[in-house]
Image: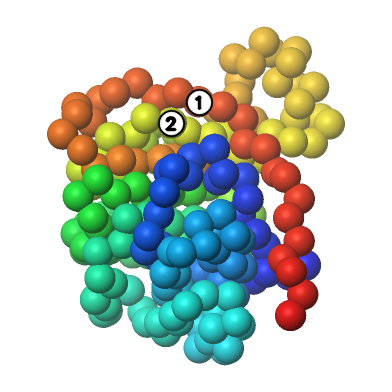
Amino acid sequence: MTYHHHVRSEISPLLPATADRIVDVGCSAGVTLAWLKQRYPSAYTIGLEANIALKLDILQNADEARIVDVTKEIPDLGKPDLMLFLDVLEHLPDPMRVLLQLTSQLAPSGTIIVSLPNVAHLSIAIPLILRGEFSYRDAGILDRTHLKFFVRESAVALVRDAGFRVDRGLMGGIDGVKSRLADAITCHCMRSRLAKQFILRGIRDDKKASTPVKWDLARYPRYDLPRK
């Protein structure tokens, strides 16, 4: 399975009970939308993607493909009630502006799910503290295409400042033997340093944005898309 064909099934605990119109911003090949179509069979799915080479793949997995650079153009999305921003906002020069512009079209009680990398992860913090090393890479938290960096508090603040109540979050990447052992030994006190990413659910309603966030570990159930 390639990067573009990775199903983000770990977001399952954050999904709303129903969804009629779903938008995945930066959808790659659109396979997460295909997976969501199994959960919400009557939903209309739209994939936004800047890479035109992925258009045919998206059309195989979603009802509609929009090839667009959201830093320059915000398309009419028709009042979606679920929007996904999975590992996309950190690639933008002004993530708040794009987040506000896109979610302005969200239905009144809509849900967004945002995934952001954690620059406070121990694999980044330890080399920085001990050796002053902060080296960009081809992938991961220090992906050389990342323009913005987040820790847990700033990730939550981004979604709250966009006008959403953040009620639940998942800490991703604590699934290997070493990270789980470190989590157990530290009595879960170091989870925010062991997590590779923070996955947040934002709900647009009239409740206070400062509602405490319930955090859980992200789980990664295997999901194979049906062959066509």
Which residue is tagged 1? Answer: 215
* Image vertical order of residue 153 relative to residue 138, above or below: above
**Apparent side of residue 220 relative to residue 23 in the rendered image (left or right):** right
Q: What residue sits 56% from the left and 27% below the top? A: 216
Which quarter of the picture shows residue 13? Answer: top right
* Residue 212: x %, y % from top left: 35, 21
Of the 4 image quadrants, the one containing the N terminus is bottom right
Circle 1 — which element? strand
Q: Judge the density around disc 2: few (<14), some (14-19), many (≥20) Cα neighbours within 10 Å.
A: some
- Evaluate whether residue 157 shows in this view: no
In the structure shown, which secondary structural element does the residue marked by tag 2 occupy? Answer: strand
Cα–Cα gap, marks 2 and 1: 6 Å
Residue farthest to the front?
Answer: 42
The residue under the point 51% across, 69% down is 27
Q: What amino acid type is highlighted by mark number 1?
A: Trp
Task: Name the quadrant of the C terminus.
Answer: bottom right
What colour scheme governs how the chains and residues are painted in the rendered image of this protein?
rainbow
Question: So how many labels did they put on this image?
Answer: 2
> 182 or 209: nearer the eye?
209
Sequence-first tag of 2 and 1: 2
Cβ–Cβ under 8 Å for marks 2 and 1:
yes
Left or right: where 125 falls relative to 203: right
Furthest residue toward right = 177
Q: Quadrant of residue 85?
A: bottom left
Residue pointed to by mark 2: 168
Which x, y percent locates residue 8? 61, 54
Amino acid carrying label 2: it is Arg
Residue 101 lies left or right of residue 71; in this view the side is: left
